Image (cartoon, rainbow, N blue to C red):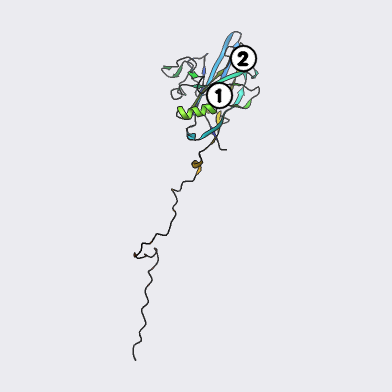
Amino acid sequence: MPELTVQPAKDSYLSAVAKDTNYGAGQFALVRVVYAGDLKLAWERAIGNFDVSVLAGATIESAKLVRHVWSLPGGGGHDAIISRCTRPADWVENQVTWNKYRTGANWTAAGGDFDDAVPGAITYSEPTSTGDHEVPGLKPHVEDALANRSGIVSLLIRLADEDPDVDQGAGWRTKEYGADVWRLTIDYTLPPDAGRRSLSGSRHHRAPAVRPGSPVRPAAGTRPATAQRPSVRRPR
């Protein structure tokens, strides 16, 4: 079964502590809350777009999100939620903040506009150790993107409990890091005729049919045969 790996076309994170600061050029995405007493020192959500339009016409068998987790405040093991961002084409990587999806345009709700109903939110548990971590169950998001979103899977990720009163969260590598970037890995199949090789670039030659009564032309590069004349002896 073929497999496609898609890295984000754009990614960032949104900070409720620095609500008008953009982090689009950062090398890490963050989903976390960090406390100092009762004060939140950090509160972030991650956002990313993945273009899967190349799979138009394919049958999606499965899809998962793979992240290289490098930070786990509180030790991990807590729940987080993946939702569909409802402004996939609108948010701008080097402008998006907690308050705005681009300069001069506010989210409907601060912290990013998202839909938990279509194609359905995914709740998962963060790992308890760093390294690559897989979140399965993204098939509906890929199918929805192909059917309804011009092939763009737009994800917004947040903690299930954003007021836990203890440190929680995870951080992972974005496309700016350049290695071990978070990604969608998709298993798919193509329609039976999609794998056939096109014959448009090759030609199959066949001997032309000869119509009755029409002369047969010699093949290119050959000289026509010359009829032999009868030999006549001259009298001596």
Residue ranking furthest to the front = 212
- Quarter of the image with the N terminus in it: top right
Crowd around label 2: few <14 · some 14–19 · many ≥20 (10 Å): many
Instruction: Relative to 116, say whether 231 is above or below.
Output: below
Which residue occupies the foreground of this view, 162 or 143?
143
Does residue 181 appear left or right of residue 109 in this picture?
A: right
Instruction: Relative to 192, say whether 162 is above or below.
Output: above
Crowd around label 1: few <14 · some 14–19 · many ≥20 (10 Å): many
Which residue occupies the foreground of this view, 53 or 231?
231
Q: Give the amino acid type for the residue marked by disc 2 in the picture.
A: Asp
Q: Give the CA separation, mark 1 to mark 2.
A: 18 Å
Task: Give how far across and how far down residue 33 sits, in percent.
Answer: 58, 15
Residue that numbered label 2 is attached to:
167
Residue visible at 50% across and 29% down?
A: 143
- Quarter of the image with the C terminus in it: bottom left
Quarter of the image where one finds residue 30: top right
- Asked if one can make out residue 154 in the rendered structure from this viewpoint, the answer is yes
Task: Give how far across and how far down residue 145 sits, in percent.
Answer: 48, 28
Residue visible at 60% across and 25% down?
A: 69
Quarter of the image where one finds residue 65: top right
Task: Give how far across and how far down residue 156 sits, in percent.
Answer: 52, 21
**Does dot 2 land on a helix, a strand or a loop?**
loop
Residue visible at 46% across and 29% down?
A: 147
Closer to the N terminus: mark 1 or mark 2? 1
